[in-house]
Structure formats: structure tokens, C-alpha cells
Image (cartoon, rainbow, N blue to C red):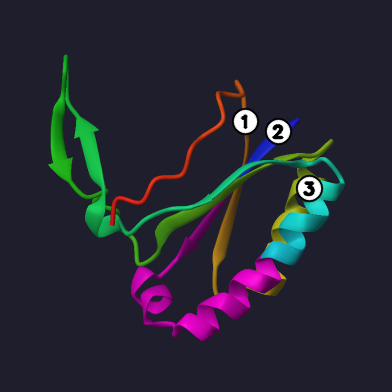
Amino acid sequence: MFYAILAYHEEEVVESWTKEEDAALMAELLEVNDRLVREKRLGPAARLGPTGRAVTLRGKDAGMVIDGPFAETKEQLLGFYVVDCPTLDAAIAVARDLRRANPTAVYEIRPILLYRPGASLTATDES
């Protein structure tokens, strides 16, 4: 079964890290990532851009685009992993590995009820 592991953190804290601190953290997270790739258990994973550049589509019909995610929380969704695990306990174990690398983050684990692999993505820089 596929599980989404959603990574939450205080965006201001993450943005305050030096390039060196961020690189060190990412190196630790990539160790978990590389292991999951070797085990053929990792699907799409992404580090999301800043919430200040996000928009939300709400309302009926075509909807209305408004600024930001308007999260009523101190932490924001900053990234996600899709993992293939036989049980929820196995997915929780993966999230614990990620948390060991980034102990100040919060990880939400959810079963994915529908997963359709898409075309490969080409990275673009819109900054």
C-alpha cells in the first residue's frame, strides 16, 4: 500500500537556516531517501516552495484564486514523500527515520487511496 508522509515545519525556522545547516540536514534526509530507493519503496518526494508564493483555489464553478494556503497552524506543509509499505506500522517506521534526520519537523502519515503514476517531471526554476 502507498502512504503519503507529509512533512510540516515552521517555515520561518527553515528559512533561517544557513546554507551549510540546510545542506547538512538535506544530506541526512537523502540517506533515508537513498535507502528507500534501494529498497524500491520510495515514490515521488518533493520539497515544496515557500507558502508566500502559494495560492489556493476555492469556491464553486471555476472557483476563485486567492493568495496563500491560509493554514491556521504554526507549522506549514513543506514537503512530502510517497512510500510503498505493507502496513501503517512500516510507514510510521519510515517517518521515524526521517524524524531522526530532522527532529524538529512533524510528520503526518496517511494512506493513499488512489495512486496514478504520471509522466516524469522536468525541473524548472521559477524563482
Q: Is residue 57 magenta?
A: no
Quadrant in which residue 107 is drawn? bottom right
Residue drawn at (44%, 57%) of the image: 78
Mark 1: amino acid? Ile
Q: Is residue 118 above or below residue 33?
A: above
Pointer 1: what residue? Answer: 112
Q: Main secondary structure of the magenta part?
A: helix
Is the Cβ of the residue at disc 1 closer than 8 Å to that at disc 2?
A: yes
| Label disc, if present, on residue 2 of the rendered structure | 2
Q: Which badge, 3 or 2, comes first in the chain's sequence?
A: 2
> Is residue 27 or residue 54 the one in the foreground?
27
For mark 1, does the 10 Å Cα neighbourhood hold few (<14), some (14 to 19), or many (20 or more) residues? some
Q: Quadrant of the N terminus?
A: top right
Is the Cβ of the residue at disc 3 closer than 8 Å to that at disc 2?
A: no
Pointer 3: what residue? Answer: 37
Magenta segment boundaries in residue numbering: 5-29
Q: Position of residue 79 (x, y in %)?
A: 50, 54
In the rendered structure, the answer to whether residue 14 lies left or right of residue 46 reads left
Residue drawn at (37%, 69%) of the image: 11
Q: Is residue 106 above or below residue 1?
A: below
Residue drawn at (28%, 57%) of the image: 127
